[in-house]
Amino acid sequence: MYIPGGRILGVSYHGDAPDGYSTYFIGVEPCEEDSRFVSWQLPAKEYVICSFEADNPKQLMASMGKMMKFTRSWLKSHGLIADGFFPEMYDHHTPEMAYMEMWIPFRARNGSE
């Protein structure tokens, strides 16, 4: 369902998924309270926020693998590792432009990772 002015939110997390897989849910941020939706709040933590833009939504989705690879590399180079889940926020989508943010909770890497 598209809600004008609302952002699209997606979250990937391990949950009950088998090793090597994850659970993913997607939703929208309504502009006002709406009883048709279940509320979910991002946990209070420290996050690394990565933002990405593309010429259009299709190009943004096609670049997702590169974005994830870059993000993992950046975290590793800063001695960090993602901790638990990957919230994504998609905003400002028009046929001419697409924008997303990944909010990544993190923790310090230990020497064995």
Image: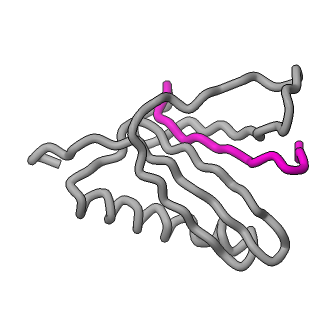
Q: Is residue 47 above or below residue 71?
A: above
Question: In the image, what residue occupies the spot 62% across and 71% down?
Answer: 53
Q: Horizontal and vertical percent for residue 106?
A: 34, 43
Residue nearer the viewer, 2 or 14: 2
Residue span colored magenta? 1-16
Q: Is residue 51 above or below residue 95?
A: above
Is residue 43 placed above or below 6 in the rendered structure? above
Q: Is residue 67 magenta?
A: no
| Main secondary-structure element of the magenta-colored stretch | loop
Q: Look at the image and tell me in which quarter the N terminus lies.
A: top right
Q: Residue at x 65, y 26 (%)?
A: 40
For this orientation, the residue located farthest to the left is 111
Left or right of residue 100: residue 35: right
Residue 98, quarter of the rendered image: bottom right
Residue 24 placement: quadrant: top right
- Residue drawn at x 83%, y 68% is 94
Residue 61, by quadrant, is: bottom right
As for residue 13 lying within the magenta part, the answer is: yes
Q: Position of residue 31 (x, y in %)?
A: 84, 39
